[in-house]
Amino acid sequence: MAMTNKEFSSHFSDTFTPEIKSFGRETLLKEGFDCLIVTDKEDKEKAYCTHCKKWVKIPGDTIHTGSPKSIQAAERREYNRHCCHGVWGMTEGDIELEKADEERRQAIKRRKYALCPECGHTFNVYHQWRMDMSQLDGTVSISIWAKSKVEPGAVVMRRIEIERNYGNGDEPVVKDTYREAERYLFRMGKKTVRQECRPRREWVFVNKKGTWRKVKRQRRFIKSIIDRAVRQSTVMWSDYVKGHYRMNIASLKTAIRNTPYQYLFTGKSNYIRNYEHYPYRESYPLYTVNLMDWYSLHPWVELLLKNGMENIVIDHVRKIGHSGAICWGAKSIKSAVKRFTKQDMKDILAINSGQELVTEKHLSILAEARELQMQLTVRQAIQIEKNGADKLTHMIFEARRLHLRPECVLEYCMKEGGMGYAIGDWLDYIADAGRVGLDLKDRTNSMPKNLLKRHANIIRQIKYRANRKLEEEMKETLVLRNKIFSWKDKKYIIRPAASTEELIEEGKALHHCVGGYAERHAKGETTILFVRTNKAPDKPLYTMEVKGSPGSGWKMVQIRGSMNADPPEEVRMMVRNFLDEVNARGSKKKARKTA
């Protein structure tokens, strides 16, 4: 049977208690609605404090803060001056003038604030005759929690809107209007009931042409708790949160005490403590409502909370974790955590009681291992998440391909990796060992005693084989290159590079990067030549790169000395003579073949 308005209202208190008004004044203060108002032009030392509702004395040199629009415009100008223009092109004198101007502006800015001697807070100062005080009007929303008046174990929440209005008369009139906007009733095992509390008549947007119609509304029940701030093309609902939204944490703690909801905010996730430190996070009140609603329909979550998994539950409601480790749509705890054993739950409770915290990511690793029929503990899952969670499936596949138990490979990785698991190192070793042809079905090869040292030896073998292949390619072309490029005159010798080792040593001696040209030189994509003197034929002097072919001719690409220095004109003349002679040889051979 549906709940009536009378039955629903019996759970709530209709009064605005002094505690509610005190929290409302605190919220208005933190949101910057309070100020000091000066009403007399002749007596600027007398001001009205909107927070403590008293006339106080302030310094007489204070100035008018300005309207909110003028403050925003000034902030934009200051931002453009400092961030957009900067100090580029300024002389030292200009910078000094800018500093002096900034000090003057800051001094003026400080005069726009004053300390109230009664309440001890610093506020903006406004001169009533210089602006329309209604520009300061605003609204904030607060959520107040309490126990149900008629049903033990039930919790209620009231969202109250506080409207701050400033009068424009000779004397300052500051009025705070408290109005209920929403009511929530949370009962364990039952759907949350939400009621909208709005004024009787409101203007509602009814079609695309811009027509508004005044509609009579009464207190009404809302089917969902998430349909706030809905905007469609034809209808705009008036159900939205006005102003900044703050939650009264003290009332929440009192309301859930000794109720089925008491386990929600008692773990290590620091949900409440985070909001106490960062009360400007306006999503917290909405998350709390969603969490209470979801918990009401899933009583088995209490067992998760008792096992220290509060952070996982809250992350699920906040839509942070979506790994599927826990079946959140289940009707019982047994079907929700069917992938985990009782020992897993004990381990989670023990870990959460210490310094670490089990997250849903750890549970997803554990569940994935169970699906692959691998026995894994919670602590091992935490270590895997720290050192290669994305490689777990690959490791299991490789272990089974090599006829190894994944659990043994994990223990081996733990032993070889020290504090963490060397899963990634083991997978790299297996891949490199396969390239050099090791028999990995032999356990001494698949799980060697010193993984890092053995892997380093494998890498050296791979490099040696690659270098040996290059050496063979260089030897095949060296005879032809010697015939084409071997040359000398009275002072210099030019010859092609004979090996990879020569290229590397040449780069080390002259401090340039010719060693990186080894592969291209071996494959014939380019030719590297060494320029030496007759007196010191083994001492590197200049390195030259040429490209071309015997038929089309050879051209110099670059020639570099020590530290990539350019050669002198004498060496350039020698290189031109060398290329002319080499190209002349090629043209003579071509003419002989043609003849």
Image (cartoon, rainbow, N blue to C red):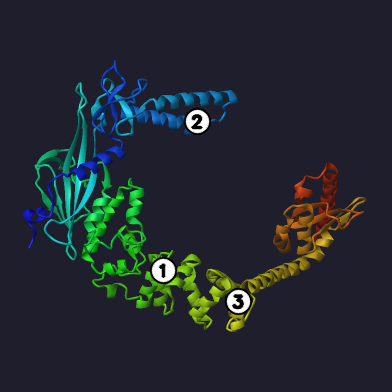
Quadrant location of residue 477? bottom right
Numbered label attached to residue 85: 2
Q: CA distance from mark 1 to mark 2?
A: 54 Å
Q: Provide residue 503's location: percent of width, then percent of height.
A: 77, 59
Give me the residue at 35% from left, 57% from top.
270
The answer, for residue 560, to whether it is visible in the render is no
* Front of the two marks 1 and 2: 1
- Contact flag, marks 2 and 3 (Cβ < 8 Å): no
The residue sitting at 46% across, 67% down in the picture is: 385
Q: What's the mark number on residue 351?
A: 1
Going from N to C along the chain, the mark reached first, 3 or 1, is 1
Q: Which residue is mark 3?
A: 434
Quarter of the image where one finds residue 366: bottom left
- Give the total of numbered labels: 3
Per the image, label 2 sits on a secondary structure element best described as helix
Mark 1 residue type: Ile
| Amino acid on which disc 2 is placed | His
344, 319: nearer the viewer: 344
SS state under label 1: helix
